[in-house]
Image: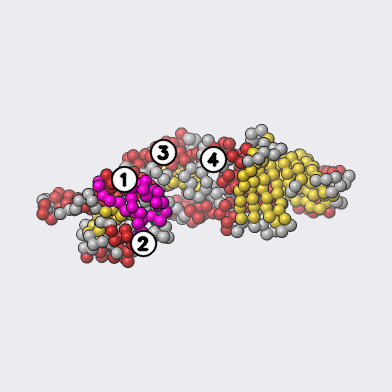
């Protein structure tokens, strides 16, 4: 088997490359590439490991024909076009906790540096000025810190600030009152935060809702003398408006680690009084970089080597322990989805997955993803578990996952049903042993078969002589039958025949099969 190939395209702790190699991946480290250079080489890789310098655009993803996973050694994934990745079946994962303490500490350092104007005092002292009377700071004790965003990093900042005896208030629409109590912050609305905070620190992702959250209008609502820190994302603050308010003295200080455009080589903020900045250093400590490098390489290797999924932003998690148990079910699910997709035609708007017996106790999301991947293959060759749910949604397909604790004839069973104009059509399958997927029912008819390779599905009148006729037809065309399965609901009604053949059946032969006496339907299948 060829080794999965991973590209590390941003500066990353060497532990990442070591782990990839140890886990059986080939790894190339190429940092500082232009978008054109990345586009030219990305087609070779199964995995791409990045930080914030690489921007993964739809063009890059379109060129990444082998790519299966993008791993962000860090938190923010605003540099990755996730919808494009999802549409191409590429998993996007991050390391949501590895650098949060480090980033929170950077925010606290910024608060303290602003309170005492340390960078400017340092520069002027080293310039030989000894400007003792030029600097008068403020204490943080007893001051109100306003958190915009109280997730992982915001909560750590709150705990540290409480240690500094600050009063912490937070604006975060997703913060529950219970959690606010747990982390010791007062939950407020944005207007209240703007009016009350002596220091404001931002800890939200950059989204359509948070973009420009500190707009000129909102900045004007802040308390005179406020100090503002942003160690989250550029784009959360109107930088030009902030520069004006620093110049006018309304804002007493601002510290930015992140800018709307990075690298920030020029800015209206540069040179303003009490303005401090760092070049996106929030996550830059030895500890954090080792954490995120190890974690991203482990996660990406889990996916590329064993199929385990953790911290993915566009698909459900699947632990490395769960993966081996789920894999045969996912194979069964994909085959059943594919069978239904090949057999049921017309305007299909609903698909339901039922899990019975042992299957009911499993993680349903990967199974649903696999059913949809099989089912949607009729629409797209490149569909997989990652993009199938998106494609399904795009097509307005209603998907349901139902668990039945009961155990029927089979100790474990998956059933996939689609609603068609002629009524519900359902297929079911089980596992023989622990890992051998078998079809057990097709449209209400009991038939046991492995769904593999090229097959032919026929519905015919249940009358003597038919098996001979179909055998003769295939034999005349030199088509060898591998397996042969028959089923029927009742004698003399309709019979179902499912056979496997060694090569695809030409369209002309299908036509002749349809014309055989008693045949109602003949559909070639491929798995
Ligand atoms: N400067 C740097 O080097 C680093 C920056 N970051 C950035 O820090 C930010 C926060 O990271 P985490 O705390 O780990 O994320 P998180 O997801 O744990 O927390 C984000 C919080 O923002 C809240 N939020 C979302 N929309 C909001 C809105 N409209 N108004 C107010 N709150 C809203 C969410 O409810 C959540 O509680 C991210 O943007 C991340 O990219 C993270 C690490 C390093
Ligand atoms: O983790 C994040 O969101 C960060 O912003 C850290 O960025 P970096 O990996 O230092 O380029």
Give the spatial CA distance, label 1 vs label 3. Answer: 26 Å
Element at label 4: loop
Relative horizontal placement of residue 12, taking residue 135 as reference (left or right): right
Q: Tell me the mark number nearer the camera, choosing from 1 and 2.
A: 1
Label 4 or label 2, whichever comes before in sequence order: 2
Element at label 3: helix
Label 3 or label 4, whichever comes before in sequence order: 3
Label 1 or label 3, whichever comes before in sequence order: 1
Give the spatial CA distance, label 1 vs label 2. Answer: 26 Å
Q: Residue at x 70, y 56 (%)?
A: 420
Q: Tell me the mark number nearer the camera, choosing from 4 and 2.
A: 2
Q: Do the residues under discs 4 and 2 have CB atoms within 8 angstroms? A: no
Q: Is mark 3 within 8 Å of ligand 2?
A: no
Would you say residue 175 sits in the magenta stretch?
Answer: yes
Badge 2 is on which residue?
A: 212
Q: Residue at x 70, y 58 (%)?
A: 346
Q: Do we see residue 52 in this rendering?
A: no
Q: Do the residues under discs 1 and 3 have CB atoms within 8 angstroms? A: no
Identify which residue, 446 or 86, lies in the foreground. 446
Identify which residue, 5 or 385, lies in the foreground. 385
Badge 1 is on which residue?
A: 159
Give the spatial CA distance, label 4 vs label 2. Answer: 39 Å
Would you say residue 186 sits in the magenta stretch?
Answer: yes
Element at label 2: loop
The tally of labels here is 4
Label 1 or label 4, whichever comes before in sequence order: 1
Identify which residue, 273 or 197, lies in the foreground. 197
Q: Do we see residue 99 in this rendering?
A: yes
Label 1 or label 2, whichever comes before in sequence order: 1
Badge 3 is on which residue?
A: 294
């Amino acid at each position: 088997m060829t080794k999965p190939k991973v590209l590390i395209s941003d500066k990353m702790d060497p532990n990442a490359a070591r782990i990839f190699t140890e886990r059986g991946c080939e790894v190339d480290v190429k940092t500082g590439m232009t978008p054109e250079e990345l586009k030219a080489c990305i087609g070779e890789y199964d995995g791409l490991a990045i930080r914030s310098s690489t921007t993964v655009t739809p063009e890059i993803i379109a060129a990444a024909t082998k790519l299966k996973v993008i791993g962000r050694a860090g938190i923010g994934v605003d540099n990755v076009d996730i919808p494009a990745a999802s549409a191409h079946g590429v998993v996007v994962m991050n390391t949501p906790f590895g650098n949060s303490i480090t980033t929170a500490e950077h925010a606290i350092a910024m608060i303290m540096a602003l309170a005492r104007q340390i960078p400017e005092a340092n520069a002027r002292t080293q310039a030989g000025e000894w400007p003792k009377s030029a600097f008068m700071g403020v204490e943080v004790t007893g001051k109100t810190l306003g958190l915009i965003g109280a997730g992982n990093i915001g909560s750590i900042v709150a705990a540290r600030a409480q240690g500094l005896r600050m009063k912490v208030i937070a604006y975060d629409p997703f913060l529950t009152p219970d959690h606010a109590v747990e982390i010791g912050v007062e939950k407020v609305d944005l207007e209240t935060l703007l009016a009350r905070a002596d220091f404001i620190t931002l800890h939200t992702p950059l989204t359509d809702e948070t973009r420009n959250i500190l707009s000129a209008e909102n900045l004007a609502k802040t308390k005179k003398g406020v100090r503002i820190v942003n160690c989250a994302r550029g784009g959360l603050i109107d930088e030009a408006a902030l520069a004006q308010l620093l110049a006018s003295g309304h804002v007493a200080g601002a510290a930015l680690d992140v800018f709307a455009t990075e690298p920030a080589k020029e800015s209206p903020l540069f040179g303003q009084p009490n303005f401090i900045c760092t070049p996106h250093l929030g996550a830059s400590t030895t500890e954090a970089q080792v954490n995120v490098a190890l974690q991203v390489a482990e996660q990406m290797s889990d996916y590329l080597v064993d199929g385990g999924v953790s911290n993915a932003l566009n698909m459900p998690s699947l632990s490395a322990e769960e993966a081996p148990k789920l894999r045969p079910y996912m194979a069964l699910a994909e085959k059943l989805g594919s069978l239904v997709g090949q057999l049921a035609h017309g305007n299909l708007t609903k698909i339901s997955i039922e899990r019975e017996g042992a299957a009911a106790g499993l993680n349903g999301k990967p199974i649903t993803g696999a059913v949809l991947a099989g089912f949607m293959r009729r629409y797209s060759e490149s569909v997989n578990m990652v993009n199938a749910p998106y494609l399904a949604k795009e097509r307005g397909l209603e998907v349901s996952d139902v668990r039945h604790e009961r155990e029927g004839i089979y100790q474990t069973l998956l059933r996939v049903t689609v609603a068609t104009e002629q009524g519900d059509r359902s297929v079911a399958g089980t596992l023989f042993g622990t890992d051998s997927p078998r079809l057990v029912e097709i449209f209400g008819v009991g038939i046991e078969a492995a769904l593999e390779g090229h097959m032919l599905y026929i519905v015919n009148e249940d009358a003597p002589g038919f098996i001979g006729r179909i055998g003769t037809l295939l034999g005349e065309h030199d088509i060898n039958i591998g397996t042969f399965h028959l089923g029927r609901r009742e004698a003399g009604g309709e019979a179902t025949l499912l056979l496997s053949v060694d090569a695809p059946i030409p369209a002309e032969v299908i036509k002749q099969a349809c014309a055989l006496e008693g045949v109602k339907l003949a559909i070639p299948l491929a798995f």
